[in-house]
Amino acid sequence: MPDRRAMLLCMDPSPSAPAGASADMLRPFSPPEQHIPRLRRALLDWFAVNQRRLPWRVNYTPYEVWVSEVMLQQTQMERGVDYFNRWMARFPDIAALAAADEEAVLRQWEGLGYYSRARHLLAAARKIVAEHGGVFPSDLEAIRALPGVGPYTAGAIASIAFGEKLPCVDANVERVIARVFDVDSPVKQDPAAGVVRRWALRLVPEGRAREHNQAMMELGALICRKKPRCEVCPLAEFCISRHLGIAEQRPVPGKRAVIKPVQAVTGVLRRAGLVFVQKRPPSGVWGNLWEFPGGRVEPGESPEAAVVREFMEETAFAVRVAETFGIIRHGYTTYRLTLHCFGLDLAAAGQTPAAQLTAATECRWVRPADLEALAMPAAHRKLADRLFAGKNQ
């Protein structure tokens, strides 16, 4: 019986390969050249009917496209839409964002994680005001020069907001291209990563970059998912991996990140109706966020002993455990946090000593109600909500 892959390759005896790719790498991925226009049309026709109604697709302003792209990194669409709408109500344009203080920006971002993204948005807005008169730059190099804007985000803004003939290659697009062209090595690594980028550029039609790039991402999100819905895919007839019966084996996975369990403690120290919080340094994990002090549990150490030790090391406060608030679990990209939470009192009665900070830049005694205005890590916000939400304190 003839090999099905060989039959597919014979369809195009002299395929046109993207520049810079070896013949051995690209030959299996090249569909008949005359099929590319049909593939593009099929994709755009599908998108015109099936695209989701998203708030940044109303006017396609560069500011809205930029914020949406940054938010949707590491964030599911439904959640991203909610955050986007709240962000735009608070910071409706570049000028409003540039004029905001960092505390307000971080608080608005709270829960999305990777807080450097929010700080970069603020820094970039201020740069746009200072260097571009408050108008988002259309030049790709100027976009790329904004704080926090990498190649993907710059390409997305330039193509979706300004119509530049550039590709957008996110995980959804990687998955689509890996299946359509049967990329048979991990797409996050070269040489496959380069092949994916070159195919992504080759497929962008003149004058339709905005629609095409969004269609590719939408197809990956709705149809060409981890478990592909090939029966309703507009690109089914062009998809080599589908014809070979290996669509679920593409993309080839890379090495999985090891998820490390972390045991940690935190303590809510209260005195005279106030709660002690400290602000983390700007660099490192949870930069510039407010937290209840704490840290990791050492081997052989009990959580109760750990929270007393951590408070002494970070604040010089001698404390004792007054009550237990249970455990909060929260997942991050590379670790799984188990946070043991305690209510604390100062060990000695009398005047409150001054804190001597070793892991923070600032500290405050605040009313529980004031915690609502402070940007906190997700696990600490969960604890604050558990203890104080809806209470007039």
Image (cartoon, rainbow, N blue to C red):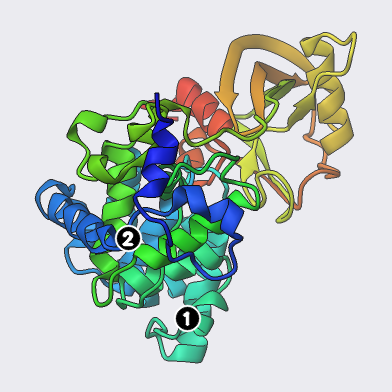
Q: Could you tell me if the residues under marks 2 and 1 are in contact, i.e. CB atoms within 8 Å?
A: no
Whether residue 222 sits left or right of residue 375 in the image: it is left
Q: Label 1 belongs to which residue? A: 140
Q: CA distance from mark 2 to mark 1?
A: 16 Å
Asked if residue 101 shows in the view, the reply is no
Whether residue 387 sits left or right of residue 51 in the image: it is right
* Up/down of 211 relative to 230, above or below: below
Which amino acid does the dot numbered 2 rest on?
Asn
Nearest to viewer (mark 2 / mark 1)? 2
On the image, the x and y values in percent for residue 185 come to 59, 40
On the image, the x and y values in percent for residue 375 come to 53, 46
Residue beneath the point at 64% across and 38% down: 291
Give the SS element for disc 2: helix
Which amino acid does the dot numbered 1 rest on?
Leu
* Dot label at residue 213: 2
Asked if residue 369 shows in the view, the reply is yes
